[in-house]
Image (spheres, rainbow, N blue to C red):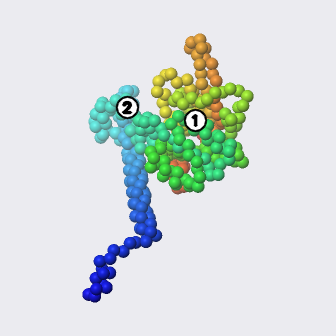
C-alpha cells in the first residue's frame, strides 16, 4: 500500500447532515410501521376471537331452549318431549346447579355491552368535517351532557383514523354529529371496539346558546340520573341500552342532575334538568339546563362506523307495505 492509501484508510469521514436526517427518518418511520402493524395484528386477533364467540352462540341458545323446555315440563307436570329424553338426566343435573345469573341465556357474545358496567364509559365526541360555528357550539353542549366525554376537532381525519384513535386510547364510544346548512340534523353513536352503531336524525334543536333571556346557570359535572321512558319493545330496549351506556352511573344519591330520554311515537326527546327540594321530598322544583332536541332512530348496524360491509340489524323503511310497524 502507498502512503496516500494508508492516510485515507485512517481518516474518518463525517456524514453530511442531510444523510443523517434521512437515516433517522428511515429508523423512526420503520418504528411507526412496526407499531402500526402490531396494532393491525391485535385488532385482527380480537376480531377473530369475537367471531369465534359468536359462532358458539347458536349452540348455547339451543342448550338454553332445551333446559327451558325441561324446566317448563317439570313445573307444569307434563311429559318430557321425546327428542329430549336421551339428554334429560344431564340437563336436569345442569338445571339443579344453576342460579339466578346462570339460568339466563348464556349466549352473550352478541351482547356488546355485557361488560360495560365494569368501568365508566369514555366517550369521544366530534363533528363532521368543516363544521359551522353553530355545530361547534352544539357539540360543546353535547360533550357537557356526558361527564366522561372528550371533544376533539375533526380536522382532516377520516372515519378509519377516528376509529383507530378510539381503539388505541381505550375509548368506549364514538359520537359524531352532522349538520345541514348549519343546523344539526344527525347523530351517530358507535360502540368500540366492534360496534354496534346507531344512526339518529335530529330535529327541533334548542341549544343553551339560544336561551339568552333566562339565567340557566352553568352545567353541573356530576354524573346524571337517567330516565328512560317508554322503551318497551325489543328494539326499544336495544336503543335504550345503546344510549344509557354513554353515561356513568351516579356515584351516590346526591346528584341533582337528570337526563330524560322519552320515547313518543318513535321520536326520542332528550331533556336535561336539575332539581331542588326546598321543602322536602313532596316539593320538587325542576330547572331545564339544556340542550334539548328530538332524535329519530333510522338504522342500527352491527359494526363500527367505518365498517361499510357490516350487517344491518335494523333499518327504518317508512314506505314498506306492512300491517304492523316495528316500533320502539
Q: Is residue 130 above or below residue 27?
A: above
- The secondary structure type at the circle numbered 2 is loop
Q: Residue at x 44, y 38 (%)?
A: 116
Residue furthest right in the image? 213
Q: Which callout, 2 or 1, points at the residue further toward the start of the chain?
A: 2
- Could you say which quadrant of the image residue 67 lies in? top left
The image position of residue 8, as x and y in percent, is 32, 81
Q: According to the image, label 1 marks what residue?
A: 144
Front residue of 225/317: it is: 225
One can see residue 239 in this view: yes
Q: In the rendered image, which quarter contains the N terminus? A: bottom left
* Relative vertical location of residue 226 with respect to residue 47 in this rendering, above or below: above
Which residue corresponds to the image point at 62% horizontal and 49% vertical from the top-left?
128
- In this view, the residue farthest toward the top is 279
What percent of the width, then of the height, locates residue 126?
Answer: 58, 46
Q: Position of residue 139 (x, y in %)?
A: 61, 41
Residue hosting label 2: 101
Amino acid at each position: 500500500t502507498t502512503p496516500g492509501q494508508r492516510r485515507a484508510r485512517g481518516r474518518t469521514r463525517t456524514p453530511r447532515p442531510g444523510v443523517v436526517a434521512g437515516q433517522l427518518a428511515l429508523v423512526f418511520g420503520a418504528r411507526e410501521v412496526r407499531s402500526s402493524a402490531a396494532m393491525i395484528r391485535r385488532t385482527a386477533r380480537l376480531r377473530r376471537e369475537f367471531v369465534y364467540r359468536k359462532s358458539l352462540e347458536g349452540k348455547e341458545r339451543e342448550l338454553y331452549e332445551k333446559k327451558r323446555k325441561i324446566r317448563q315440563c317439570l313445573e307444569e307436570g307434563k311429559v318430557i318431549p321425546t327428542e329430549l329424553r336421551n339428554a334429560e338426566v344431564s340437563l336436569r343435573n345442569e338445571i339443579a346447579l344453576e342460579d339466578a345469573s346462570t339460568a339466563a341465556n348464556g349466549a352473550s357474545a352478541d351482547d356488546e355491552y355485557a361488560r360495560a358496567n365494569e368501568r365508566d364509559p369514555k366517550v369521544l365526541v366530534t363533528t363532521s368535517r368543516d363544521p359551522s360555528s353553530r355545530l361547534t357550539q352544539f357539540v360543546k353542549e353535547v360533550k357537557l351532557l356526558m361527564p366522561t366525554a372528550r371533544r376533539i376537532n375533526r380536522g382532516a381525519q377520516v372515519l378509519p383514523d377516528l376509529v383507530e384513535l378510539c381503539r388505541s386510547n381505550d375509548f368506549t364510544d364514538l359520537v359524531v354529529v352532522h349538520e345541514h346548512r348549519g343546523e344539526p340534523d344527525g347523530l351517530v353513536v358507535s360502540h368500540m371496539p366492534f360496534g354496534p352503531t346507531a344512526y339518529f336524525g335530529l330535529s327541533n334543536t334548542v341549544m343553551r346558546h339560544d336561551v339568552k333571556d333566562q339565567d340557566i346557570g352553568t352545567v353541573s359535572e356530576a354524573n346524571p340520573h337517567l330516565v328512560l321512558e317508554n322503551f318497551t319493545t325489543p328494539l326499544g330496549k336495544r336503543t335504550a341500552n345503546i344510549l344509557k351506556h354513554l353515561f356513568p352511573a351516579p356515584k351516590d344519591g346526591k346528584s341533582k342532575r337528570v337526563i330524560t330520554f322519552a320515547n313518543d311515537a318513535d321520536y326520542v326527546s332528550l331533556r336535561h334538568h336539575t332539581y331542588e327540594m326546598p321543602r322536602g321530598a313532596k316539593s320538587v322544583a325542576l330547572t331545564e339546563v339544556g340542550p334539548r332536541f328530538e332524535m329519530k332512530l333510522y338504522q342500527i348496524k352491527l359494526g363500527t362506523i367505518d365498517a361499510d360491509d357490516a350487517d344491518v340489524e335494523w333499518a327504518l323503511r317508512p314506505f314498506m307495505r306492512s300491517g304492523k310497524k316495528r316500533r320502539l
